[in-house]
């Protein structure tokens, strides 16, 4: 089975595109969502995150997201340490999930593929791109956040130019109807590649 990575900068439309693949009956694994679920469900992760951040990391067994976000924002080393706890668990969860799939290919959405040099774990990589200003506006509309916070995240992400260079396919997500057409075309191509 083919593993197709789906990436792109903040607000580019990764989840929107992932949903379009799902509508075509392609199994989609959204690494970020699974990481959040595991942070609440896994006792091992909880214990390690409390050791890292302190008791405030959880409120009644629920991850205290604003607290963790403020910690990470103030000290970048925390992000790496948290990733070192969470990522291996997500990787083994993905392996178990992947073994159960029977589709010709699957989509794994992850914001950071190139940034962590994980390219080799995928057969193909799709990057979703959109105008940066448009992306910022989309995220401002979607989340309770600030332009400053979005720009801080943008600073940590590779440029679209670099991502495109390292991708097999690019989806330009400006207009939703056109995006859907690109997804359908790519879906057919991926099915052909499988046969
Ligand atoms: P993040 O990096 O924050 O996880 P993402 O890349 O997964 O974001 P989405 O959540 O899919 O991006 O899209 C960001 C927001 O923009 C969402 O509210 C989505 O509904 C909206 N959006 C996505 N694509 C378009 C589009 N072509 N036109 C208008 N709005 C869009």
Image (tube, rainbow, N blue to C red):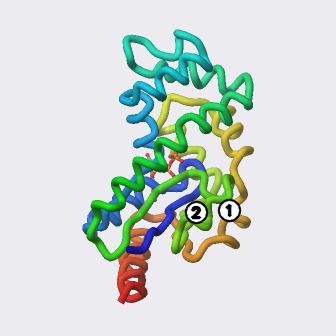
Q: Residue 16 placed where, x, y %?
A: 41, 56
Which quadrant of the rendered structure holds the C terminus?
bottom left
Lower position in the chain sequence, tag 1 or tag 2 = 2
Horizontal relation, residue 172 to residue 39: left or right: right
Horizontal relation, residue 162 to residue 93: left or right: right
Which structural element holds mark 1? helix
* Residue displayed at 54% across by 17% down: 50
Which quadrant of the rendered structure holds the N terminus?
bottom left
Q: Which residue is mark 1?
A: 160
Q: Which residue is mark 2?
A: 129
* Residue displayed at 57% across by 34% down: 85
Q: Name the quadrant containing residue 164.
A: bottom right
How far apart are labels 1 and 2 at the CA level? 7 Å
Q: Residue 119 placed where, x, y %?
A: 62, 65
Crowding around mark 1 (Cα neighbors within 10 Å: few <14, some 14 to 19, many 20+) is some
* Residue displayed at 60% across by 45% down: 136
Q: Name the quadrant containing residue 3.
A: bottom left
Q: Residue 21 placed where, x, y %?
A: 34, 66
Q: Name the quadrant containing residue 113.
A: bottom right
Horizontal relation, residue 74 to residue 18: left or right: right
């Amino acid at each position: 089975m083919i593993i197709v990575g789906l990436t792109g900068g903040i607000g580019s439309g990764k989840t929107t595109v992932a949903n379009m693949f799902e509508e075509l009956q392609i199994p989609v694994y959204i690494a970020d969502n699974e990481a959040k679920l595991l942070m609440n469900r896994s006792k091992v992760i909880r214990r390690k995150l409390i050791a890292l951040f302190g008791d405030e990391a959880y409120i009644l067994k629920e991850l205290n997201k604003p607290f963790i976000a403020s910690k990470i924002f103030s000290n970048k080393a925390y992000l790496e340490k948290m990733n070192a706890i969470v990522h291996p668990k997500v990787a083994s969860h993905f392996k178990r999930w992947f073994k159960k799939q029977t589709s010709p290919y699957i989509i794994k959405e992850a914001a950071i593929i190139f940034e962590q040099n994980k390219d080799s774990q995928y057969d193909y990589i799709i990057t979703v791109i959109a105008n940066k200003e448009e992306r910022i506006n989309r995220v401002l509309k979607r989340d309770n956040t600030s332009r400053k916070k979005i720009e801080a995240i943008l600073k940590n992400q590779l440029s679209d130019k670099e991502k495109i260079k390292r991708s097999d396919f690019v989806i330009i997500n400006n207009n939703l109807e056109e995006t859907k057409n690109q997804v359908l075309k790519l879906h057919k191509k991926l099915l052909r590649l499988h046969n």
